[in-house]
Amino acid sequence: MIDTHAHLDGLDDPRAALGRAWEQGVEAVAAVAMDAAGGRLALRLAREDQRVWPCLGLHPWRVTQETWRQEVDFVARHLAQAAALGEVGLDYKKKVKKQIQRAALAAQLDLAAAQGLTALVHCRFSERRVLAMLKEAGVRAVFHWFAAPELLAEVLAAGHFISATPSAAVSPPHRAAIEACPLERLVLETDTPVAHAGQPSEPGRVIETCRLVAEIKGLAVPQVAAVTGANARSLFKLPRPLALL
Ligand SMILES: [Zn+2]
């Protein structure tokens, strides 16, 4: 089982949480950044343990007029060390100018294209625009915590993947998307430290995501773990050369 989306900088003790995940049989955890501070921690943890896959990116919530260029510059300087670009995207519900969000996303997608990296994308009220920008940049993506089943066919036709979170226990649109998505296009995640069903997440909860996907799709847990694990390994650039870390 692989947690493809965890913000380890959101945990009080990320190393202890990782330790618990390994004990429970989690094979790898993608440490996803929202900004340079999160990116630095992801790189540090990846240096300590190869099962941590570092991902770098500037999240739309962290985009500001004053700092986005500097943040994207951090991504540019360190992306060769990353297993994927992320978390990036567009969030039209947030009060950050759409134009600046798009500028930050476009610059980062170009960087991912140059490195041949997958993008881990967040989109709210912006799915079509994100799809168009991915197409223009020639970048494959994971649509993280995907809860727009009406857009699934378009996302799949463009060659992208979606990810499932423990919120599949309570979110009908998320469940519908998981049910309709072929297992070969699905990966598992926790979005640590986000709370699902009132419980804060840590990477070990990816086991719960796996059980939920198995239940929704009427499949056996080991099959879901094996196929989604293989999907994750094909999407992330691994292993990163130690010399780079
Ligand atoms: Zn996230």
Image (cartoon, rainbow, N blue to C red):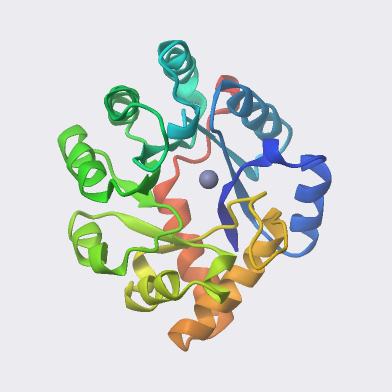
- Residue at 37%, 52% in the rendered image: 143
Image location (x, y in percent) of residue 194: 63, 52
Which residue lies at the image location 62% right of the left edge and 29% below the top edge? 38
On the rendered image, what quadrant is the C terminus found in?
Answer: top right
Quadrant location of the N terminus in the rendered image: bottom right
Residue 187, x across and y down, in percent = 46, 61
Furthest residue in direction bottom, as rendered: 218
Reply above or below: 11 against 82: below
Asked whether, in this view, residue 152 is left or right of residue 2, the answer is: left
Residue 17 screen position, x and y as percent: 79, 49
The x, y position of residue 161, in whole percent, is: 34, 57
Name the residue located 69 percent from the left edge and 35 percent from the top edge. Answer: 9
Q: Residue at x 34, y 23 (%)?
A: 104
Q: From this viewpoint, which residue is outermost toward the front?
A: 95
Residue 173, by quadrant, is bottom left
Horizontally, residue 129 falls left or right of residue 199, namely left
Image side of residue 73 versus residue 113, left or right: right
> How many numbered circles are shown?
0
Depth order, front residue of 14/122: 122
The picture quadrant where one finds residue 120 is: top left
Of 96 and 199, nearer the camera is 96
In the image: residue 46, left or right of residue 36 = right
**Is 68 located above or below residue 39 in the figure?**
above
